[in-house]
Amino acid sequence: IIVIGDKILHRIFREKFLHFPVELTCQRLVMCDDQRRFVQCLDDIRHCKSLTRTGDTEQCLELIALPETFHQLRNGLRLVSGRLVDHGKIHWVSVCSAVCLLVTFTVFATVHQSWVFFVCALMIGIGYGVGVPAFQCLFVNVAPHNMRGTATSTYLTSFDLGVGIGMLSAGFIASCAGLAVAYGVGAGCCLASLGVYLRWVRSSYEKHKLLV
């Protein structure tokens, strides 16, 4: 049971998972590290953090900031995109993710205002969060059932490798030409990726997919 102001909340995490972080914004709660244990994951309200229980060690008072709400929103959208992929909307979700990142990087590179930076940060998180299930599904659905683990590891390795190369390249470009140019190059990469997806990946997936 949780009491916030004049409200008494009971197991709100399981019932209104997406709305609850908004209510907690700017509140200070006693929290502890849950270390992703199953029981405490049910009460997880931020990354590896949950409300304390009797006997928990290393308790601390922490502020629930607005970015945590964005984090939970991104996770919620990932669940929604996963459902859309299950209903055959894999190409629609993939294209929307790529377009979202393309537009966001372009705006970030061209409009230099503080509120735009915050909005772009949210949209970048949403773009990646929405696209991850769809792109992983592309790999898994073209692999035989006895090689889906290999397909998943290949996807995750490629994703991590791409993130690493992107971070190094963006840092080099930003040091030489500025951060705006780095995000402009990122937008160009998103445009190229979208073209490759529409021209080759979509047709190849439809030809070789093993699941309907």
Image: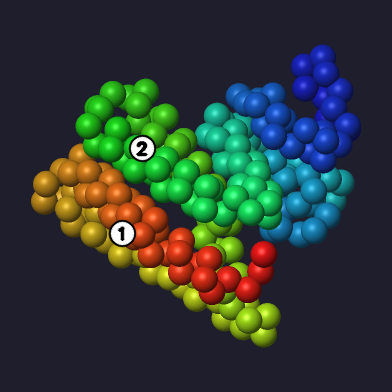
Give the quadrant of the N terminus.
top right
State the image coordinates of residue 19 (x, y, percent, origin top left): 70, 29
State the image coordinates of residue 210 (x, y, percent, origin top left): 63, 73
Residue designated by label 2: 104
Q: In terms of sequence position, does the residue under pointer 2 or pointer 1 come before the other?
A: 2
Residue designated by label 1: 166
Q: Tell me how far mark 2 sits from mark 1, CA to CA.
A: 16 Å
State the image coordinates of residue 120 (x, y, percent, origin top left): 39, 34
Q: Secondary structure at mark 1?
A: helix
Q: Is residue 111 above or below residue 191?
A: above
| Residue nearest the observer in this picture, 58 or 77 | 77
Dot 2 amino acid type = Thr
Whether residue 179 is visible to the viewer of this picture, yes or no, is no
| Residue nearest the observer in this picture, 211 or 112 | 211
Q: Secondary structure at mark 2?
A: helix
Give the quadrant of the C terminus.
bottom right
Dot 1 amino acid type = Gly
